[in-house]
Structures are given as C-alpha cells and as structure tokens.
C-alpha cells in the first residue's frame, strides 16, 4: 500500500465503499448507488475512482449499457488495509478521525438494516454487545487468533443459496484502570 493508504482508506465515503465489497463481492457503480443511496452519484464516482487509482478496487468486467461502459469492480482485500507503520505514525487526532469514520460506516450499515423493512433482531441474528474480561497480552493474542480461526472458513465461503452476507465488526480496547483500591 502507498504511504497515503490511511488517507485513502479512512475517508468516511471510501470506507463505506470498501465495506460494501467485503465478502468477495463484485459490484458496479449502479450496485453501489443502490447500497449507498445517501451518497450523491458524483461523489460516489469520484471516490470509486480514487480507490481504483489507489489499487484498492480493480475492474473485473466491462459491458455496454445504453451507450456507456458499465464496469464491475472487485476489492483487493490485501490492499484495503492500513499498514502497521502508518498506524504507528498516526496522531491521536488521526486515529480519532479514522475511528469516527469506522463508527459512522457502522451506523450507516445499521440504519440501512433498520430502514430495510421489518427489522427483527432475533430472527436476523443481529446483535451488539460488549463484554469485559481480564487477559494478559499473550492470552489476548490467543483470543484474537481463535476468533480469526473461527471466522476464516466463512470468509472463504462465497455466496450460495441460503447464505446471507454478514458483517462482523470488532472493536477491542483496554478498559480504563480503576483509580481506587482494586481489592475493594
């Protein structure tokens, strides 16, 4: 990824475009306009172009539609990440802006779910929770590896009858330390 991958990927609209492709999807700009209907078409086209120029999206097919060329895009997942070096170099303000973009995209996804008909969180297996636990750094790395191992087969499985595309979003933070006696 280029030195500007954080700037490229962590823009709120571009982040939502990238997230629309998760699950090895191939989408046209018309598909994206339906999924991101709140984004003006000119803005959407400009951000898709930036992601293509940055190597994050590639054209997988083209066809003529009413005198214009419709392109189908695919996400390069390996190019849709911010490097460890870039993360370390980001300021607290940069991280705040990136996290805000992430949360805004998550809120937009949830809004689309709620606005998409008759939401039934139990039927649709939708949930949002927070769990607190104690772990050493080594134990936490084991938790992360176990979650990755559990999800990996589903990341590789493509669409099929009976399968619903799911979004798993995670945030892992250390909880604030207690300032009073922890033994109380």
Image: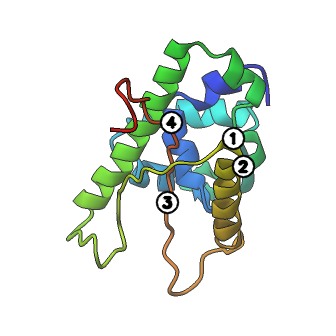
Q: Which mark, by number, is residue 167?
A: 3
Q: Nearer the viewer, mark 1 or mark 4?
A: 4
Q: Which mark, by number, is residue 77?
A: 2
Q: Label 3 crowding class (10 Å Cα cut-off): few <14, some 14-19, many 20+?
A: few
Q: What residue is pinned by disc 1?
A: 80
Q: Residue furthest bottom?
A: 161
Q: Quadrant of the N terminus?
A: top right
Q: Label 1 crowding class (10 Å Cα cut-off): few <14, some 14-19, many 20+?
A: many
Q: What residue is pinned by disc 4?
A: 174
Q: Which badge, 1 or 4, is on the more N-terminal residue?
A: 1
Q: CA distance from mark 4 to mark 2?
A: 27 Å
Q: Quadrant of the C terminus?
A: top left
Q: Which badge, 4 or 2, is on the more N-terminal residue?
A: 2
| Image position, residue 141 (x, y; %) | 70, 49
Relative to the observer, which residue lies in front, 50 or 4?
A: 4
Disc 1 and disc 2 in contact, CB within 8 angstroms: yes
Q: Which badge, 1 or 3, is on the more N-terminal residue?
A: 1
Disc 4 and disc 3 in contact, CB within 8 angstroms: no
Q: Nearer the viewer, mark 3 or mark 2?
A: 3
SS at circle 3: loop
């Amino acid at each position: 990824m280029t030195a500007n991958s954080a700037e490229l990927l962590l823009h709120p609209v571009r982040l939502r475009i990238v997230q629309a492709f998760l699950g090895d999807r191939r989408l046209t700009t018309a598909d994206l306009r339906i999924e991101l209907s709140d984004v003006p078409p000119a803005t959407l086209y400009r951000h898709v172009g930036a992601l293509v120029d940055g190597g994050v999206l590639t054209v997988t097919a083209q066809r003529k539609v009413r005198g214009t060329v419709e392109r189908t895009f695919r996400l390069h997942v390996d190019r849709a990440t911010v490097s460890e070096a870039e993360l370390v170099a980001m300021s607290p303000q940069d991280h705040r802006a990136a996290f805000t973009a992430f949360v805004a995209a998550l809120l937009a996804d949830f809004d689309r779910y709620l606005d998409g008909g008759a939401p039934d969180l139990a039927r649709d297996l939708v949930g949002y929770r927070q769990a607190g636990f104690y772990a050493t750094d080594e134990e936490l790395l084991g938790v992360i590896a176990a979650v990755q191992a559990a999800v990996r087969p589903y990341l590789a499985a493509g669409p099929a009858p009976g399968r619903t595309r799911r979004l798993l979003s995670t945030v892992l933070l250390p909880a604030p330390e207690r300032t009073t006696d922890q033994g109380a």
